[in-house]
Image (spheres, rainbow, N blue to C red):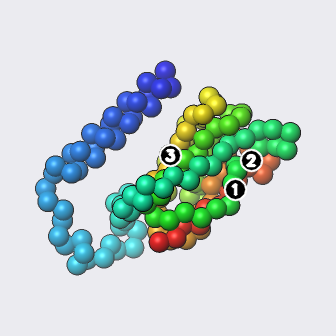
Amino acid sequence: MLNRTYRALTLMAVGIGAAACTGKPAASNDAANPPATGAATGGGSVAKPTGKIVTVQLITDAVGNYFKPADFEVHRGDIIRFTLSVGVHNVHFLPDSNPGKLNLPPVSDFLQLPGQTYDVPVNFEPGTYYFQCDPHVLLGMKGHVKVER
Ligand SMILES: [Cu+2]
């Protein structure tokens, strides 16, 4: 069920991507007109993929509930691969805790199966971003990722 939903979403995303690629030629006025403040929501620049995958584990153990690593750096174009190790967790780049940041990824589904992943392509502007696991944030399950160009 989960897998099927995930696959459908993936197909949708691929479909949208393909449509975007085969659509009209890239708007040539993008370069001439820097996006107005707030206009880039959802339409920000897509970073060129670096091929680098940064794995972050989601863990429940005797120490508690936590991301490992919880504070790390990535570059634009990397992929952050949140991977469930133990427990039931999600990943939420809370807008309220990331004021002024654009292109925040959607909140993930709950990861419940060990090895289950949630990929976040790093298309954000350079800066430090906060994320948390909603059910465990009060237990300290949160982290920061610093995005570098
Ligand atoms: Cu959690």
* CA–CA distance in space, label 1 to label 3: 16 Å
Identify the residue under disc 1: 70
* CA–CA distance in space, label 1 to label 2: 7 Å
Mark 2 near ligand 1 (CB under 8 Å)?
Answer: no
x and y, in percent, of residue 39 in the image: 35, 67
Residue 111's image quarter?
top right
Residue type highlighted by circle 3: Asp
Describe residue 73's horizontal placement relative to residue 20 as left or right.
right
Identify the residue under disc 2: 66
- Front in this rendered view, residue 135 or 113: 113
x and y, in percent, of residue 28 in the image: 17, 70
Residue drawn at x 31%, y 41% as measured from the top left: 14
- Front in this rendered view, residue 94 or 45: 45
26 vs 84: above or below: below
Residue 57 seen from this side: yes
Residue drawn at x 21%, y 51% as measured from the top left: 21
* CA–CA distance in space, label 2 to label 3: 18 Å
Residue drawn at x 51%, y 52% as measured from the top left: 53
Residue type highlighted by circle 2: Tyr
Residue 138 seen from this side: no
Q: Secondary structure at mark 1?
A: loop
> Could you tell me if the residues under marks 1 and 2 are in contact, i.e. CB atoms within 8 Å?
yes
- Front in this rendered view, residue 57 or 131: 57
Q: Which mark is residue 25?
A: none
Identify the residue under disc 3: 119
Residue type highlighted by circle 1: Ala
Q: Earlier in the sequence, mark 2 or mark 3?
A: 2
Q: Secondary structure at mark 3?
A: strand
**Count of marks overlaid on the render:** 3
> Could you tell me if the residues under marks 2 and 3 are in contact, i.e. CB atoms within 8 Å?
no
